[in-house]
Amino acid sequence: MNYMKKETDTHRGLWELAVLCFLRERPMHPYEMQRLLLERHWDEVLVVKRGSLYHAIGRLQAARLIAAAGVSRDGRRPERTTYQIAPEGRQELVRWLRAMVAVPVREPSTFMAAITFLSTSIPTMPSPSSRIARDALSRNSALPRSL
């Protein structure tokens, strides 16, 4: 099964990728996924819209890459469906990630454009490889400190 149909589908499918990654750790419900998403700063790489997570879960269920593991209720709160990754979902996750990193894709980024143009546009500004640029990058907790 080839879930990631073509390169242009990758942005639409990042939510599905995130869900598969969460469920590879352990079965969980969407509220927990949402909490982890914010805690891990994944919201910085995903376009967060109301319902995105639930739509992705629906698409993954339809593709039989995940399945409902159970339904629970805590007091008067709404029922919570816990999902688990299917064996096909585990295989697809690995295949999908390998395909994504096998060929780098150039994607526009406002931040990277600013870094690129910084030294040429304003001569008195330091070059992108300077300590100031590295410090700016390291302040962003979602980026690796090694930059």
Image (cartoon, rainbow, N blue to C red):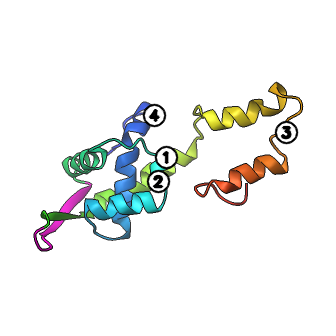
The amino acid beneath tag 3 is Ser
Residue 98 higher or lower than 4, as above or below: below
Looking at the rendered structure, the secondary structure element under dot 2 is helix
Tag 1 near tag 3, CB within 8 Å = no
The amino acid beneath tag 1 is Val
Q: What range of the chain is rendered magenta?
A: 65-76
Instruction: Read off the residue under disc 1.
Output: 45
Q: Residues within 10 Å of mark 4 (few under 14, many from 20)?
A: few
Q: Residue at x 63, y 53 (%)?
A: 140
Lower sequence index among marks 2 and 3: 2
Instruction: Read off the residue under disc 4.
Output: 7
Q: Is residue 73 magenta?
A: yes
Cα separation between marks 2 and 4: 21 Å
The disc label shown at residue 42, or none: 2
Q: Residues within 10 Å of mark 1 (few under 14, many from 20)?
A: few
Q: Residue at x 80, y 41 (%)?
A: 128
The disc label shown at residue 127, or none: 3
The answer to whether residue 92 is seen in the rendering is: no
Cα separation between marks 4 and 1: 17 Å
The answer to whether residue 129 is seen in the rendering is: yes
The amino acid beneath tag 2 is Trp
Which tag is nearer the camera, tag 4 or tag 3?
3
Tag 4 near tag 3, CB within 8 Å = no
Looking at the rendered structure, the secondary structure element under dot 1 is loop
